[in-house]
Amino acid sequence: MGEALYVRFQATRRSPRGHFPGVFALANGLARDGRLSEEQYRFWRAGNDWYDANYPNPSDTDPTVYDHELNPGAVAWFKTSAVRLIERVDGYLILLAAHDVGCVRVESADPGKIIYEDAEQVVVVPWEHDSPRPRGAAGQPYAS
């Protein structure tokens, strides 16, 4: 097993589409469903605004990157070198834990076929689309 080059924070349970939603999708779902307190909503909105301002949205570069037919199961991973972006995930993990939404940190040296890459992240089609973890990954639960 190689050194982890990528990190992802994802649900502990599959979505109805069969994949494991990432930390931002999970938090966005809570906001969309009106489940956040005013304070949590302010945190979520400010956090999303910060991420939008500080790293690229892969869909802006390639609108087909998350197309379910072209790139089944495509998911984003932080590069482990993107420390300032990864550090800010902690607030989202606290938010999810407050709503009993399970989320794990997954690390991998080779999470899948890279279909998008920038300085901070990659989007991949997982090698094992049906597996809850990519090859060589280790998950550590944050909430149950």
Image (cartoon, rainbow, N blue to C red):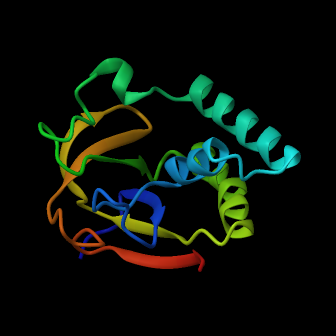
Q: In the shown orientation, is residue 41 left or right of residue 90?
A: right
Residue 42 placement, left or right of 24 = right
Seen at 44% across and 27% down, the residue is 57
Give the percent coordinates (x, y) of residue 97.
69, 69
Q: Residue at x 25, y 46 (%)?
A: 74
Answer above or below: position of 5 versus 47. Answer: below
For the N terminus, the quadrant is bottom left
Measuring from the top left, give residue 127's x and y in whole percent.
14, 61
Among the 4 quarters of the image, the one containing residue 102 = bottom right
The image position of residue 106, as x and y in percent, is 42, 68
Q: Nearer the viewer, residue 25 or 7?
A: 25
Q: What count of labels does the image hold?
A: 0
For residue 26, which quarter of the picture?
Answer: bottom right
Question: In the rendered view, does 25 fall on the left or right side of 107?
Answer: right
Instruction: Give whichever of 83, 8 is nearer the camera.
Output: 8
Instruction: Name which residue lies at 50% across and 78% down.
Output: 140
Q: Residue at x 23, y 51 (%)?
A: 73
Tell me the quadrant of the picture where the C terminus can be found: bottom right
Note whether 111 is above or below 113 in the view shown.
Answer: below
Query: How far across and down, in percent of the image, does residue 70 sit?
Result: 12, 36
* Outermost residue toward the right in this view: 39
Which of the two residues, 130 or 112, is positioned nearer the viewer here?
130
> In the rendered image of this protein, does residue 64 appear above or below residue 17?
above
